[in-house]
Image (cartoon, rainbow, N blue to C red):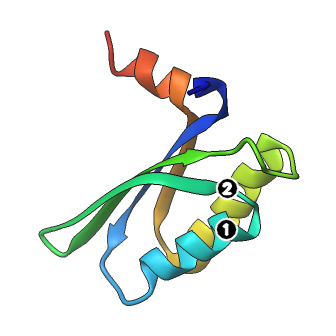
Amino acid sequence: MNSDNQIIITVTGKDKVGIVAKVSNCIAQNSVNIEDIKQTIMQDNFVMIMLCNISKMQISFKEFKENILQLANELGMEIWVQKKDIFDKMHNI
Protein backbone atom coordinates (compact mmCIF):
# COMPACT_ATOMS: atom_id res chain seq x y z
CA MET A 1 0.00 0.00 0.00
CA ASN A 2 1.24 3.47 -0.86
CA SER A 3 1.75 5.24 2.46
CA ASP A 4 1.75 8.61 0.62
CA ASN A 5 -2.03 8.25 0.61
CA GLN A 6 -2.32 7.32 4.28
CA ILE A 7 -3.00 9.72 7.13
CA ILE A 8 -3.40 9.39 10.89
CA ILE A 9 -6.26 11.22 12.58
CA THR A 10 -6.17 11.49 16.38
CA VAL A 11 -9.20 12.71 18.33
CA THR A 12 -9.13 13.49 22.06
CA GLY A 13 -11.38 15.30 24.49
CA LYS A 14 -14.23 15.00 26.93
CA ASP A 15 -16.41 12.00 26.08
CA LYS A 16 -19.86 12.81 24.68
CA VAL A 17 -22.45 11.24 22.40
CA GLY A 18 -21.85 11.37 18.64
CA ILE A 19 -18.08 11.90 18.36
CA VAL A 20 -17.42 8.86 16.16
CA ALA A 21 -20.46 9.60 13.99
CA LYS A 22 -19.55 13.25 13.41
CA VAL A 23 -15.86 12.59 12.70
CA SER A 24 -16.68 9.64 10.42
CA ASN A 25 -19.28 11.72 8.56
CA CYS A 26 -16.78 14.53 7.95
CA ILE A 27 -14.22 12.02 6.72
CA ALA A 28 -16.73 10.32 4.40
CA GLN A 29 -17.95 13.66 2.98
CA ASN A 30 -14.36 14.28 1.86
CA SER A 31 -14.07 10.83 0.17
CA VAL A 32 -11.55 9.64 2.76
CA ASN A 33 -11.64 5.95 3.64
CA ILE A 34 -11.15 4.68 7.20
CA GLU A 35 -8.81 1.67 7.06
CA ASP A 36 -8.36 1.08 10.79
CA ILE A 37 -9.79 2.63 13.93
CA LYS A 38 -9.06 2.29 17.64
CA GLN A 39 -10.89 4.08 20.40
CA THR A 40 -11.06 4.02 24.17
CA ILE A 41 -12.25 6.03 27.13
CA MET A 42 -9.51 7.07 29.59
CA GLN A 43 -10.85 8.69 32.78
CA ASP A 44 -13.83 10.33 31.02
CA ASN A 45 -11.63 11.35 28.07
CA PHE A 46 -12.39 10.01 24.62
CA VAL A 47 -9.35 8.91 22.59
CA MET A 48 -9.53 7.71 18.98
CA ILE A 49 -6.85 7.01 16.39
CA MET A 50 -7.77 6.40 12.78
CA LEU A 51 -5.68 5.23 9.85
CA CYS A 52 -7.25 6.66 6.71
CA ASN A 53 -6.63 6.61 2.97
CA ILE A 54 -6.93 9.89 1.06
CA SER A 55 -6.32 8.56 -2.48
CA LYS A 56 -9.90 9.40 -3.57
CA MET A 57 -10.09 12.77 -1.82
CA GLN A 58 -11.19 15.56 -4.18
CA ILE A 59 -9.78 18.48 -2.18
CA SER A 60 -6.26 19.36 -1.06
CA PHE A 61 -4.80 17.91 2.13
CA LYS A 62 -4.67 21.47 3.52
CA GLU A 63 -8.39 21.98 2.85
CA PHE A 64 -9.17 18.63 4.47
CA LYS A 65 -7.20 19.59 7.57
CA GLU A 66 -9.11 22.89 7.72
CA ASN A 67 -12.42 20.97 7.56
CA ILE A 68 -11.29 18.69 10.38
CA LEU A 69 -10.11 21.63 12.52
CA GLN A 70 -13.48 23.32 12.05
CA LEU A 71 -15.16 20.10 13.25
CA ALA A 72 -12.78 19.99 16.23
CA ASN A 73 -13.90 23.50 17.21
CA GLU A 74 -17.58 22.53 16.86
CA LEU A 75 -17.07 19.43 19.02
CA GLY A 76 -14.79 21.14 21.55
CA MET A 77 -12.21 18.39 20.90
CA GLU A 78 -8.58 18.22 19.84
CA ILE A 79 -8.14 16.62 16.42
CA TRP A 80 -4.75 16.15 14.77
CA VAL A 81 -4.28 15.11 11.15
CA GLN A 82 -0.89 14.12 9.80
CA LYS A 83 0.55 12.14 6.95
CA LYS A 84 1.39 8.59 8.05
CA ASP A 85 5.01 8.93 6.89
CA ILE A 86 5.52 11.93 9.19
CA PHE A 87 3.67 10.20 12.05
CA ASP A 88 5.91 7.13 11.67
CA LYS A 89 9.10 9.22 11.62
CA MET A 90 8.04 11.13 14.73
CA HIS A 91 7.41 7.89 16.61
CA ASN A 92 10.55 6.04 15.48
CA ILE A 93 13.12 8.24 17.20
**Which quadrant would the C terminus be assigned to in this image?**
top left
Relative to residue 30, is residue 88 drawn left or right? Answer: left
Q: Residue at x 76, y 62 (%)?
A: 30
Residue 23 falls in which quadrant of the image? bottom right
| Circle on res. 32 | 2
- Identify the residue at image location x=61%, y=78%: 74
Depth check: give the residue in front, 28 or 83.
28
Badge 1 amino acid: Ala
Instruction: Evaluate if marks 1 and 2 touch, with contact meaning CB atoms under 8 Å apart.
Output: yes
Counting from the top left corner in percent of width and height, residue 4 is at 65, 25
Q: Quadrant of the N terminus?
A: top right
Q: Is residue 85 above or below residue 55?
A: above
Give the amino acid at mark 2: Val
Q: Nearer the viewer, residue 2 or 50?
A: 2
Q: Secondary structure at mark 1?
A: helix
Q: Position of residue 6 (x, y in %)?
A: 58, 36
Q: How many marks?
A: 2
Tell me the residue at 32%/14% (across/down).
Answer: 92
Q: CA distance from mark 1 to mark 2?
A: 5 Å
Q: Residue at x 55, y 48 (%)?
A: 52
Image-based side of 83 in relation to 70, left or right: left
Residue furthest to the front: 1
In this figure, which residue is indicated by the disc labeled 1? 28
Image position of 73 with respect to 10: above or below: below
Above or below, 80 against 1 in this view is below
Q: Is residue 72 above or below residue 9?
A: below
Q: Residues within 10 Å of mark 2 (few under 14, many from 20)?
A: many
* Other-residue count near label 1 (Cα within 10 Å), few / some / many at <14 / 14–19 / ≥20: few
Residue 81 location, quadrant? top right
Residue 43, image x, y percentages: 12, 70
